[in-house]
């Protein structure tokens, strides 16, 4: 079975969080992704430098790239 290649595009924050944590409830997945961001100062600073704001619901492709850089592909 071929795995689909992860595509850098606009994602909803919850949508991307669920891709990283598919076995937990969506709300828990969002909390986990927020923790990963806020517990790594370099990750957080770089994400904010490309326009991320607390509570943002849609992630731009450049923001998704930063997340993938620090967390890897989902």
Image (cartoon, helix red, strand yellow):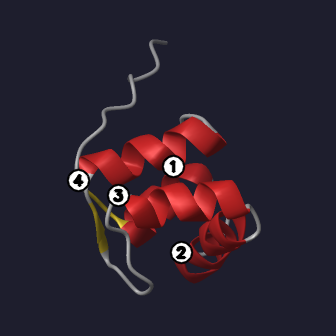
Q: Reading the chain from its start, which is encountered first: label 4 or label 2?
A: 4
For the C terminus, the image quarter is top right
Nearest to the eye among marks 1 and 4: give it. Answer: 1
Q: Residue furthest right?
A: 39
Q: Disc 2 marks which residue?
A: 26
Q: Reading the chain from its start, which is encountered first: label 2 or label 3?
A: 2
Disc 3/disc 1 C-alpha distance (Å): 11 Å
The relative height of residue 54 versus residue 18 in the rendered view (above or below) is: below
- Give the label on residue 50, or none: 3
Nearest to the eye among marks 4 and 3: give it. Answer: 3
Q: Reading the chain from its start, which is encountered first: label 4 or label 3?
A: 4
Disc 1/disc 4 C-alpha distance (Å): 12 Å
Q: Are marks 2 and 1 in contact (CB under 8 Å)?
A: no
Q: Reading the chain from its start, which is encountered first: label 1 or label 4?
A: 4
16 on left or right of 22: left
Counting from the top left corner in percent of width and height, residue 19 is at: 50, 51
Disc 4/disc 3 C-alpha distance (Å): 14 Å
Nearest to the eye among marks 3 and 1: give it. Answer: 3
Q: Residue furthest bottom?
A: 55
Nearest to the eye among marks 2 and 3: give it. Answer: 3
Disc 2/disc 1 C-alpha distance (Å): 18 Å
The answer to whether one can see residue 23 in this image is no
Disc 4/disc 2 C-alpha distance (Å): 18 Å
Could you say whether the residue bearing mark 4 is in a helix, strand or loop? loop
Q: Are marks 1 and 4 in contact (CB under 8 Å)?
A: no
- Give the label on residue 10, or none: 4
């Amino acid at each position: 079975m071929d795995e689909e290649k992860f595509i850098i595009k606009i994602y909803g924050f919850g949508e991307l969080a669920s891709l990283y944590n598919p076995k937990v409830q969506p709300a828990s997945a969002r909390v986990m992704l927020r923790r990963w961001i806020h517990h790594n100062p370099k990750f957080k600073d770089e994400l904010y430098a490309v326009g991320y704001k607390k509570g943002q619901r849609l992630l731009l492709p450049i923001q998704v790239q930063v997340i993938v850089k620090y967390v890897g592909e989902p």
